[in-house]
Image: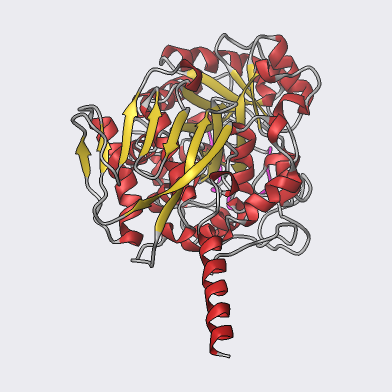
Amino acid sequence: MLRSILMFSLITLQTMAMALSPAVLSDVSLIPKPVSVIPANGTFKLTDKSAIFVTVESPEVKMIGKYLADKLNPATGFGLEVKTATGDHYAGNIYLFLSADAQLGNEGYQLTINAEVVTLTANKPAGLFNGIQTIRQLFPSNIEMASKQQGPWELQAGTIRDYPEYAFRGVMLDVARHFFQVEDVKRSIDLMAAYKMNVMHLHLSDDQGWRIEIKKWPKLTAIGGSSQVGGEKGGFYTQEQYADIVKYAAERYITIIPEIDMPGHTNAALASYPELNCNGKATKLYSGTKVGFSTLCTKKEITYQFVADVFGELATLTPGPYLHIGGDESHVTKLADYIPFVNRVQDIVAATGKQVIGWDEIALSTLKPNTFVQFWAKAENASKGVKQGAKVIMSPAANAYLDMQYDATTTLGLHWAGYIEVDKGYNWDPATFVPGIGKENILGIEAPLWSETITNMKEIEYMFFPRLPGYAEIGWSAPAGRSWDEYKVRLGSQGGRFKALDINYYPSKLVPWAVEK
């Protein structure tokens, strides 16, 4: 009897160990799916004697090493330090270094694990940062916990080579309909970074609110920033707060793209400055959710001074290459006024040294070189953009809008573009979605989260997850290696990680969730 109990206990312990530590590297459910995973024999064990070594005297690479240490230390309790390697590699440590490898490009990496050391190499620092996200997923999910957890902390041996399919892999957060605090934006950035996404598009203005301080036009925030959907108090980011968000994102290799939507979606600006209206009268602040009723006065010269001042200040604050001019749903702007307006705004943005992005309606105008069209509604507009030489950012509302309800039973979100369950969000290929628009015409993908019904961070998380990892994979992984039946298993294995990260996620019944015990 005693022998049977001991045998049962041994089998139970072995089963638990297998659940926490996959037998081979290729069994780990990584998202996004890497280009290549080659397992090998052996296991690397992280201990309280381990350290993270960087092989160059680079403040940037050291910062990446510290980022990794900060991710591993709370749960392990090891107090891992970042040191500079002087030559030989010693057992038990993690090594980060830059090495010329053209195939890896700007964001790719190679991760080699054996029983002695972990070696992460990349062409560029961004590649090292992406490789760290893979290391995080290779550890048991409780590595993400904020308090000390029981080990062991092991990595299966093998080699991973990985690089992205598209250079642009983004999420849009609408802070205009409902305002979100700086810490909420930072939390969103961290969740994106964990899945190798590299663009955060901030929708900073709309009918319901203006969210960025503009020194030359202070009433934009004093008046336009005071409202939001539902009639509650709004808010805005000071330029210092915005700069802090930009810096925080840059440290995670995420580019911030600010959007000032125009000539429509401008009621907050029109309520702040009557001279931007054709009748010279300020509109009333708006806290509803209708669209298409507002427009800047496109024939007034003051309008273009306003545009130049706003984008001039934003360009100074934003080191990334893009400024987003909106351009969507300007239903009360006559096409004869809309086209010259968009043409002139493109020139204004170009004069700041930035590249223009606009929603697909801007393709009705004459697109300038280095203007990008963001497809959301009409494929014919995206095609018009391509015919003018523009590249496209793919954000089809029916597949990629994070604000759409999962199904009829979920209360958050809308469904004007249809319901987007997790499989529908994953099962599309940007390069075949619109006939005549191939990979060569596409800059990348973006999943927008509009906030008509979203009011706080937990609601943001619920709409992000579990769809966001799928959009990350669409942007990163080659379509030939993707299938829903295989992906849903890998996604299910992320359930423990979601819980460890305290993510409020939608537990889709389509996903076989396998939460670690």
From this viewpoint, which residue is outermost toward the bottom? 1
Say if 465 sits above or below 62 in the image: below
- As for residue 337 lying within the magenta part, the answer is no
The span shown in magenta is 280-292
Q: Which quadrant is the N terminus positioned in? A: bottom right
* Residue depicted at 39% across the width and 17% down the height: 100
Name the residue nearer the viewer: 145 or 374.
Answer: 145
State left or right for residue 332 relative to residue 226.
Answer: right
Whether 291 is among the magenta residues is: yes
Q: Give percent across and percent down for residue 55.
A: 25, 29
The structure residue drawn at horizontal position 71% and vertical position 62%, both measured from the top left corner, is: 410
Q: Magenta residues: mostly which secondary structure? A: loop
In the displayed structure, 81 sits above or below 312; it is below
Q: Is residue 203 visible?
A: no
Nearer to us in this view, 227 or 444: 444
> In the image, residue 215 lies at what x, y percent?
32, 33
> Please, which colouring scheme is shown?
secondary structure
Q: Is residue 60 above or below residue 2?
A: above
Q: In this view, does 326 lie to the left or right of 102?
A: right
Question: Which of 138/364 is in front?
Answer: 138
Residue 255 position in % (x across, y down): 44, 31
**Residue 337 horizontal/vertical position (percent):** 66, 18
